[in-house]
Image: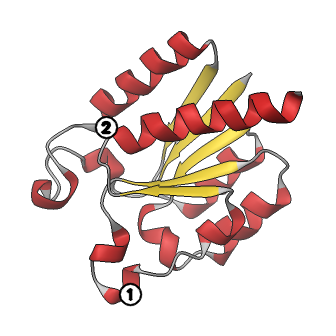
Amino acid sequence: MKIVVIHGPNLNLLGVREPDIYGSVTLEEIDGHIRALARELGVEVEIVQDNSEGALIDAIQRAGAGIIITPAGYTHTSVALADALRAVSPPAIEVHLSNILAREPWRHESITATACVGVISGLGADSYLLALRGLCALLEATKE
């Protein structure tokens, strides 16, 4: 079973970009934790980070059994990403390091979440691990 983890724009700058909001953990460290948990759970992960919307859509379209996505700034603007998530059959969970509902009002609406089975927000890097556990449980339950 393969799960695609998609990191959107500017996440390559984690650890140096606004650490008061996003923390000091780097994307490489987050990816390492994701890979370790995936091994523990017995699933394969493909991890993608890109700053362009088209590349993120390409990653969605080649997804395996499930998707974990942090659309970042595209969360609030991208009908194209939401349409791509709806166009494929794998379930997706949206992840945010920060609590988007506790931030600026324009961040409170997620266009992409409307195409996801769930959203995990505000738990920092652990948000990804919770999403991976949740997605694996969901995929196992649908196999039965």
The residue under label 2 is: 27
- Viewer-closest of 102 and 62: 102
Q: Is residue 78 above or below residue 143?
A: below
Q: Label 1, secondary structure: give it.
A: helix
* In the depicted structure, whether residue 13 falls above or below residue 140: below
Task: Tell which of 142 and 29 is nearer to you.
Answer: 142
User: Mark 1 near mark 2, Cβ–Cβ under 8 Å?
Assistant: no
* Circle 1 residue: 106
Q: Position of residue 110 (x, y in %)?
A: 53, 75
In the figure, is residue 27 to the left or right of 38?
Answer: left
- Residue furthest to the left: 20
Query: Residue 56, can we see it?
Result: yes
Is 106 left or right of 110, judged from the image as shown? left
Residue at horizontal 32 percent and vertical 50 percent from the top: 123
In this view, the residue in front, 67 or 84, is 67
The kind of residue on which mark 2 rests is Leu
Identify which residue is drawn at 49% across, 78% down: 76
- Residue 25 is situated, as x and y percent measured from the top left of the image, at 20, 38
Instruction: Label 2, secondary structure: give it.
Output: helix
- Report how many numbered discs are placed on residues in the image: 2
> Which quadrant is home to the N terminus?
top right
Three-letter amino acid code at the position of disc 1: Trp
Where does residue 84 sit, x and y in percent of width and height?
75, 61
- Residue sitting at x 64%, y 38%: 135
Other-residue count near label 2 (Cα within 10 Å), few / some / many at <14 / 14–19 / ≥20: some
